[in-house]
Amino acid sequence: MGADSGGGTVTSGLDARDEELAARLRLVIGRLNRRIRIDGSETLPPLQLSTLVTVEQHGPLRLSELARREGVTAPTMSRVLSALDEQGMVARAADPGDARGVLVSIADTGRSCLREIRSHRNALIARRLDRLDSAQREALVAALPALEALLVPDED
């Protein structure tokens, strides 16, 4: 395995067909995600949105655990949580296991915001799906299990 210019690793064992598939998949997923974010014009920046989803799925969490899950430093997460707290999206409570610690959970306002964003993004994707013929839609349905399998973390 060699290093690429971005600091990641490149698997040299891929054949040309798999390399092309990986490149096309990366490009289409990245562009579709960017298009959804742009067209969605959400009021929450990406890191705030991601943090809110993480708190919804795994909360209540300590700031350090949130920072680890989001791949940011504790000071960055502190700023993100302050912004979410100011908007009433999260609630903070004392950690019963550690009197010095604070647990962050999602507030009703945060749940409502996520419902609205998801609904809007689903509508955006549905409009794009309307452009496809039935064979293309069926191909997407058939590909979903494989795409979902790509979300499983690598085993280290």
Image (cartoon, rainbow, N blue to C red):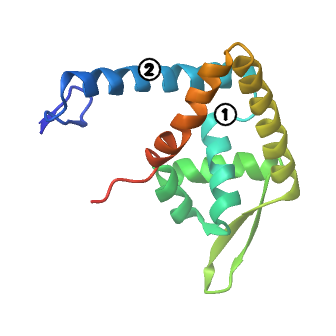
State the image coordinates of residue 5 (x, y, percent, origin top left). 21, 25
Mark 2, other Cα within 10 Å: few <14 / some 14–19 / many ≥20: few
Report helix, strand or loop for mark 2: helix
1 vs 2, front mark: 2
Instruction: Work out whether 105 lies above or below 53.
Output: below
Q: Give the residue displayed 25% in from the left and 37% down from the top.
A: 8
Q: In this view, does 66 lie to the left or right of 15?
A: right
What residue is rendered at 60% in x and 40% in y?
47
User: Which quadrant holds the C terminus?
Assistant: bottom left
Q: What element carries label 1?
A: loop
Disc 1 or 2, which lies upstream in sequence? Answer: 2
Q: Could you say which quadrant of the image residue 114 lies in? A: top right
- In the displayed structure, would residue 106 be above or below residue 34? below
Which residue is labeled 2 in the image?
27
The residue singled out by tag 1 in the image is: 45
Q: Can residue 43 be seen in this view?
A: no
Q: Is residue 127 left or right of residue 50?
A: right
